[in-house]
Amino acid sequence: MQELLTAANLPDPERDRREVHRTALCVVEKFVGLSLPKDRIVNGTLPTVLLEPA
């Protein structure tokens, strides 16, 4: 997945936080083969889950 993040120029502390968030979601979508609702990504919020090691 690091290759996809690098190709998307992430991490980049100079970019707008919302743009970084959208870009990161797109990278995750490609990596795991998910389809996320574009309108909710661009204009709203999505539920999140924090996974911790067992």
Image (cartoon, rainbow, N blue to C red):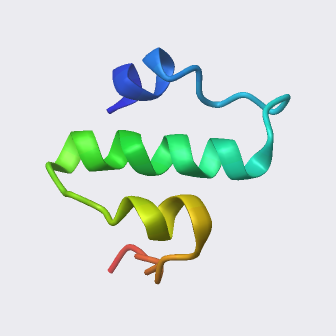
Q: Which quarter of the figure is the C terminus placed in?
A: bottom left
Q: Which image quadrant for residue 11?
A: top right
- Foreground residue among 50 and 13: 13
Q: Is residue 50 left or right of residue 31?
A: right
Q: Is residue 28 above or below residue 43?
A: above
- At a point 30% along the width and 62% down the height, the residue shown is 36
Q: Residue furthest left?
A: 33
Residue 12, x across and y down, in percent: 72, 28
Q: Which image quadrant for residue 34?
A: bottom left
- At a point 39% along the width and 59% down the height, the residue shown is 38
Q: How many labels were placed on the picture?
A: 0
- At a point 43% along the width and 81% down the height, the residue shown is 49
- At a point 33% along the width and 66% down the height, the residue shown is 37
Q: Is residue 26 left or right of residue 43?
A: left
Q: Which image quadrant for residue 35?
A: bottom left
- Foreground residue among 14 and 22: 22
Q: Is residue 33 above or below residue 1?
A: below
Q: Is residue 46 above or below residue 29?
A: below
Residue 21, x across and y down, in percent: 60, 51
Residue 24, x across and y down, in percent: 50, 44
Q: Which quarter of the figure is the N terminus placed in?
A: top left
Q: Is residue 12 left or right of residue 29?
A: right
Q: Residue furthest right?
A: 14
